[in-house]
Image (spheres, rainbow, N blue to C red):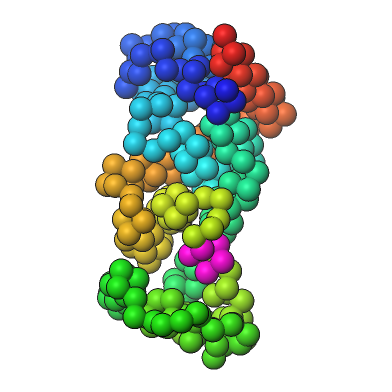
Amino acid sequence: MKTLALTTLITALAISPAYADDKATYQDIQKTLGLVPAFFKAVPDQAIGAAWGELKSIELNPRTALPGKTKELIGLAVAAQIPCRYCTYFHTKISGLAGASDEDRKEAIAMAALTRHWSAVTNGLQIDLAEFKQELGRVIAYVKHPTAKGDAPPVTDAASAYKDMEHTLGSVPTFLRRFPEEGVASAWLELKSLELAPNTSLDGKTKELIGLAVASQIPCQYCIAYHTEIAKLTGASDQEIREAVAMAASTRHWSTIVNGSLIDETAFRKDIDQVVTNAKRAAHK
């Protein structure tokens, strides 16, 4: 019942791209959420209808390609690395309504951290983008048809890490080869044990869509190219990719509004807590 709370709250309501005026918009927000959180009033009257329409038609819409839990975890991951305390709180709470576990949230945040980490590496070392994409193509081809035999060797130092990369990826990409040898074993093991592992709480497609969403608003061309292709490899459709990017944009949008308007954080959290309470009540009717 808990996982259906947010969907139950809005399924019966019409999804409209915009509203005639600010009064009609606030009435619809009240009808949908059970109150009008104060941060909505920070949006100019002439824009609130469209701003609310986009939020409702993508994030709150139960009929999108991405499920609610995935959208909220994307929002949380993006918020965590902006960083935005408002949006982090919002998406933590709303992801719970959508069925996300504590482990799901930990992994979403860790994927955000991992994406920022490798974005810093590829950009800071000025890796050639064309070469990066060529190497990515070779990695994908290898993953589709691996040739390595036996178990991967244990990773204890740089040399064994490179061997494990060759076993896993078919080669050692330039950005990994140029990472300091003193830290490459640990850096590789974190990437492998979180993003590349099949036995995590989040499935591979969800992790890659989170990575793409974070990358799209850094922005990082390397990570965008990487996570787009790996997301497709793990089964993501073009529509799911578009929605992941749209969720990243939406999170940055509302983060800008609440931070730029100096919204009172205690009052904000109180409003969000009430939204959650209203959703749970609606789910039990």
Query: Which residue is drawn at the image coordinates 52% and 69% (left, top)?
Result: 192
Tell me the magenta residue range.
192-197
201 vs 71: above or below: below
Q: Can you give x and y, in whole percent of width and height, for residue 216 in the image?
A: 40, 53
Q: Can you give x and y, in whole percent of width and height, for residue 56 in the image?
A: 41, 24
Quadrant in which the C terminus is drawn:
top right
Q: Is residue 34 magenta?
A: no
Query: Which residue is drawn at the image coordinates 30% and 73% (left, top)?
Result: 145
Residue 37 left/right relative to 163: right
Q: 217 or 228, which lies in front?
A: 228
Q: 66 or 119, which lies in front?
A: 66
Q: Does the magenta stretch include residue 195?
A: yes
Q: Can you give x and y, in whole percent of width and height, for residue 128 in the image?
A: 34, 78
How many dots with numbers?
Answer: 0
**Corner quadrant of residue 168:** bottom left
30 vs 103: above or below: above
**Corner quadrant of residue 149:** bottom left
Does residue 118 appear in the picture of this structure? yes
Q: 100 or 261, which lies in front?
A: 100
Quadrant in which the N terminus is drawn:
top right
Query: Which residue is drawn at the image coordinates 30% and 69% (left, top)?
Result: 144
Query: Which residue is drawn at the image coordinates 62% and 41% (left, top)?
Result: 101
Q: Which residue lies furthest to the front in this view?
A: 150
Does residue 54 appear in the picture of this structure? no
Q: Can you give x and y, in whole percent of width and height, for residue 8 in the image?
A: 49, 18
Q: 76 or 70, which lies in front?
A: 70
Residue 204 left/right relative to 97: left
